[in-house]
Image (cartoon, grey):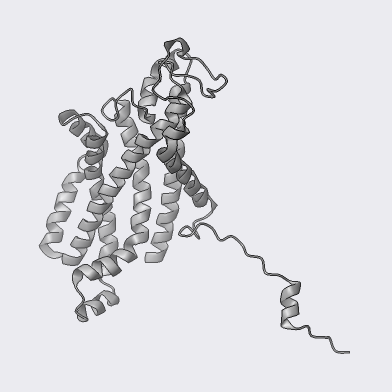
């Protein structure tokens, strides 16, 4: 007795297709850790934008009678040495703590990408001179250069961010220059040149687009370094200045509380820095691995 064949529509109805979530667009294939890190960074970004509005209390309101008071109703993290609400200062301080590294990354990436693509395209003496200048900048540690500029020019987030961006540029330019040289030697670039397409169009629409995954990966890694360096500069009193709320400043001003057995101010700000930096490093590492596998 022959088996009865069911129509295709009946088979499809009997076994409905289940759609599986493939991950965040742009991060597919990077693993669960990268997706969790991206969610942490999105949450941190939202806090940086809306932190002042999310703060339950005035982050700058001081009441010395509450100095070093622990968690109470309405103040889950307690108060700092000046009697200011710690949770409100954490939320408000996210803006400068994340805005500075973002500015450093954007400035360093723009300069580094332009130099890398120009060196790969022009080559010759231009490449030699630029590479030599970048090697000179390698001799200056980023944080030392930022401290020097802050002392000479003016202490503040702006001067420290510009100095760090200049110091980070050689690292970005060198990595991207190697990738750009490989891309420059590919056959499709030569074919575009034969067609008479302008060099700027080729660099922007084709060469730069193919370098985009590596650019994003390098930017993510750089953000973590910039955040730690800017927090250290603010800790030394050369970045964001008290009484403005900032995570690096809070780690510094909380030192007196640590000595008195109340580490909450330094601890809470330090945890925020560590969480964001770890998330950025994990995401940057996964993106770098994927970019390297694509360019090989």
Q: Nearer the viewer, residue 133 or 35?
A: 35
Q: Residue at x 37, y 47 (%)?
A: 221
Taking the image as shown, residue 228 lies to the left or right of residue 170, namely right
Q: Nearer the viewer, residue 88 or 77?
A: 88
In the picture, residue 148 is in which quadrant? top left
Percent x, y for residue 190? 24, 77
| Residue 272 in the figure: left or right of residue 145 | right
Is residue 122 depicted above or below 52 in this figure? Answer: below
Q: Position of residue 253 (x, y in %)?
A: 37, 20
Which quarter of the figure is the N terminus placed in? Answer: bottom right
Q: Nearer the viewer, residue 184 or 264?
A: 264
Quarter of image, res 238? top left
Q: Is residue 34 left or right of residue 226?
A: right
Residue 278 appears anywhere in the view = no
Q: Residue furthest right?
A: 1
Q: Position of residue 18 (x, y in %)?
A: 66, 65
Quadrant location, the C terminus = bottom left
Residue at x-position 39% and y-position 61%:
292
Q: Is residue 6 left or right of residue 65?
A: right
**Count of picture labels:** 0
Furthest toward the top, the residue is 65
Residue at (78% x, 83% y) in the render? 6
Task: Say above or below: 15 vs 134.
Answer: below
State whether residue 237 appears in this view: yes
Residue at image coords 44%, 34%: 53
On the image, the x and y values in percent for residue 15 come to: 73, 71
């Amino acid at each position: 007795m022959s088996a009865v064949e069911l129509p295709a529509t009946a088979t499809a109805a009997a076994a409905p297709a289940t759609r599986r979530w493939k991950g965040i667009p742009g991060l597919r294939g990077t693993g669960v850790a990268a997706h969790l890190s991206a969610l942490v960074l999105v949450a941190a970004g939202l806090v940086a934008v809306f932190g002042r509005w999310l703060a339950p209390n005035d982050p700058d309101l001081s009441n010395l009678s509450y100095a070093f008071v622990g968690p109470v109703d309405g103040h889950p993290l307690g108060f700092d040495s000046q009697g200011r609400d710690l949770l409100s200062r954490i939320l408000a301080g996210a803006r400068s703590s994340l805005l500075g590294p973002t500015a450093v990354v954007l400035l360093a990436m723009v300069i580094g990408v332009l130099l890398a693509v120009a060196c790969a395209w022009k080559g010759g003496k231009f490449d030699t001179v630029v590479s030599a200048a970048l090697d000179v900048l390698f001799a200056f540690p980023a944080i030392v250069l930022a401290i020097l500029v802050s002392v000479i020019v003016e202490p503040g987030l702006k001067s420290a961010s510009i100095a760090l961006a200049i110091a980070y540029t050689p690292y970005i330019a060198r990595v991207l220059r190697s990738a750009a040289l490989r891309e420059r030697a590919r056959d499709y670039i030569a074919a575009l040149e034969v067609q008479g397409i302008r060099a700027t169009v080729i660099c922007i629409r084709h060469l730069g687009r193919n370098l985009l995954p590596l650019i994003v990966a390098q930017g993510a890694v750089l953000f973590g370094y910039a955040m730690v360096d800017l927090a250290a500069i603010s800790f030394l009193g050369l970045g964001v200045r008290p009484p403005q709320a900032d995570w690096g400043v809070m780690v510094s001003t909380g030192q007196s509380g640590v000595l008195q057995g109340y580490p909450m101010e330094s601890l809470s700000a330090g945890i925020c820095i560590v969480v964001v930096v770890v998330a950025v490093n994990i995401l940057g590492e996964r993106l770098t691995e994927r970019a390297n596998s694509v360019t090989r």
